[in-house]
Amino acid sequence: MTIKTINMTSNYDNDIDIDSKIKDLYETATKASATALSINDFANEVSYLLNLPIQRNKITLKLLNHIIQDTRFDKSTACNIERILTHPLNFINEHKQLLTFQQVSYIIDNETIDITNLRDRIIVAWIYHYFYKKESQFYVSKTKLLKELQSVDWKKYNIKLSDFNSFFILVKNIYYTTQHFIDLEKTMGDNILQHFYDHPEDDTDIEQYNLHKEICYNNNNINLVLFIIFC
């Protein structure tokens, strides 16, 4: 486990000096069991995160609050605020996209993180950020994806472009996707078909049935959008 020592230009030694917004965030985090830090250590950690010079992708209080709210029902501490600097890849993977790849790569590049066994996790982080956040689709043209891959300095992570081959599936020699995206798309299609081929029983009140069906359909659409954005 990597131990991170935070050196602040202005450390909080007294909670009287702590910004009220950070105090509010700490209260939210403790209620959600999203930190095990004291208020002073938490304030130092948050201040350090807020001051990371990540170009066009700075970490904000709003983002940290979103992370706390998103993980408040998690049974593990994998996404506690203090793990951002030591385990940034916990925050972007096939299950969660709480940080951007730019934020995670900056932390990996500038903090004391051993990347020896992180090759696959870095690749997965990039894939889910690119497909979900940047392109917002399950299929990306081969030309476009390869151009994007070539824009990243993978050598610093000991990653070769060929290492991505085992993660991608080439469709009709035109589009790249992954098995997970194919399975997810199939599940979505099956749910839609089930909705449209669902019929009421003979003695069902048709008006009430259609109302219930419309509500379920709208809720499924909402849940689907939330799943794609935050899964």
Image (cartoon, rainbow, N blue to C red):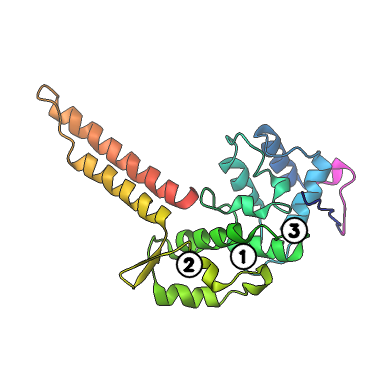
Residue at 36% x, 55% y is 182
* Residue type highlighted by circle 2: Asn
Residue at the disc numbered 2: 165
Q: Any magenta on residue 11?
A: yes
Which numbered circle lies on residue 113? 3
- Of the two numbered discs 1 and 3 in the rendering, the one whose residue sits closer to the viewer: 3
Residue at the image position 55 percent from the left and 53 percent from the top: 93
- Mark in front: 3 vs 2: 2
Magenta extent: 9-18
Residue nearest the viewer, comparing 184 with 34: 184
Contact (Cβ within 8 Å) of mark 3 with mark 2: no
Residue ID at (44%, 64%): 168
Q: Is residue 62 visible?
A: no
Instruction: List x then y, in percent, for residue 44.
Output: 81, 50
Q: Is residue 110 left or right of residue 176?
A: right
Question: Is residue 133 rendered magenta in the image?
Answer: no
Q: Earlier in the sequence, mark 1 or mark 2?
A: 1
Going by the numbered disc 3, the residue's amino acid type is Ile
